Image (tube, grey):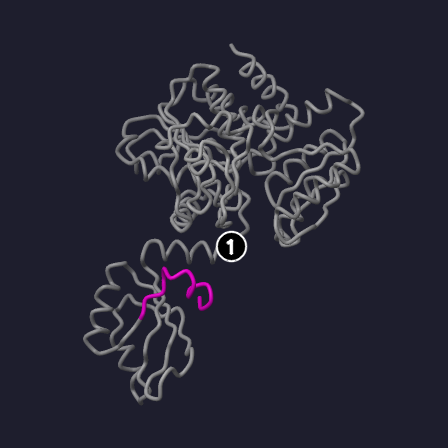
Amino acid sequence: MTDFAKAARAATAAMRDLFPATPLQRNAFLSERYDADIWLKREDLSPVRSYKIRGAFNAMTKRLAEDPERRLFVCASAGNHAQGVAFVCRHFGVRGEIFMPVTTPRQKIEKTRAFGGDAVEIRLVGDYFDDTLAAAQAFCEESGAVFLSPFDDPDVMEGQASVAVEMLEQLGKAPDRLILPVGGGGLSSGVLSYFKATGAATRVKLVEPLGGMSLAAALKAGHPVTLPVVDNFVDGAAVARIGAAPFEVLGATDPGDVLAAPENRICVTISELLNIEGIVLEPAGALAIDALQDLGAAIRGQSVVCVTSGGNFDFERLPEVKERAMRYRGVKKYFILRMPQRPGALKDFLALLGPGDDIARFEYLKKSARNFGSVLIGIEARDAADFEALFTRMAECGFAYRDITEDEVLAEFLI
């Protein structure tokens, strides 16, 4: 057994003073869908509803072992890492300064405060995470506090490897396949390091959100690079730059083993798991399950473990998730209709709707010409194919329209 494997197992054993192993559960619904043996490693059921508590615990344990007099720890995070650090600070009886962006949802702030109690102080600094991070690091330099990175730290990676330690013990063998979400790379690099150290013969696929593929970009460049634009919808994994320490491990990954999960498709997965299985996952937590459809027949008959990395879902986002899921499935569309300015025109248009078509949005934008007006219309259908028939009827009756469902610029301003 290598030194890394021994350290990861020791870290896992130490964590039992903090929380029990998260469950590894076979999922009958997914197993039947993909004709495979699908297991979920439920990190969404940790005390802070994500795996981040593992890395925070291990890193803090190491720092305190080096200097038991250390009393102040700092992190910058808008989500799961902040909650993990807060929980661990309370456990060890040390002080924590949690830097969060001013724009952080109140729910996440309150949960971090609840986990940390009197042990932590929350500082809201900056509109963007980069500003928050800079403020946290500046505070560390001034105060001599210890900065706890969310992923770019070998001790954090070692702590996240405890996911693999538990998984192999619970399954009793190495699975045929493992699907891991990737953000900054702490979880994936830790788990892959443990698999390599123990000789586990498992094929691993890594999944990034389509709007934040920092690992794929780093593999193409041969080194970590900063993405110019990141879609923050999958906030637990939308990282502009993969960590340097994790990339030392992940840099050997075959680019073909890195999958991209479209944000709107992830919403379909979130909705299905909630409605069918009663499992509440945040967008990053659904990445691994969402990627199953990209593997399809390749996993038939195999044992597959998906790591559900987090369940800190703010239910105020549920309408957005539902909306994006419907748009991905093609059952909701938005278009701008050129409506004739005459009596009965609206009635004529309504007569074109099918029995399963429902108007979810209707808004006059402006009178674009003397005889016509522009109308923003949102329609929900029972089936995506219903729209083709509707648009055919509209064209036959002379109603001009423009589908703006996938037009990011117009959708941002109008929808």
Instruction: Give the residue number, with chain letter if any, for mark 1.
Output: 317
Choose between 347 and 337: the one closer to the eye.
337
* Residue 199 falls inside the magenta stretch: no
Report which quarter residue 347 is drawn in. bottom left
Q: Quadrant of the C terminus?
A: bottom left
Q: Amino acid at mark 1?
A: Arg
The correct choice, above or below, for 143 with respect to 266 in the image is above
Farthest-out residue, top? 1
Residue drawn at (70%, 39%) of the image: 137
Count of numbered circles on the image: 1
The correct choice, above or below, for 59 with respect to 1 in the image is below
* Residue 413 falls inside the magenta stretch: yes
Specify start and end residues of the magenta stretch as a single range. Answer: 402-415
Location of residue 120 in the rendering, given as x and y in whole percent from the top left corner: 74, 40
Residue drawn at (59%, 16%) of the image: 7
Location of residue 290 in the rendering, given as x and y in whole percent from the top left corner: 39, 41
Farthest-out residue, left? 396
Residue drawn at (63%, 34%) of the image: 149
Location of residue 150 in the rendering, given as x and y in whole percent from the top left corner: 60, 35
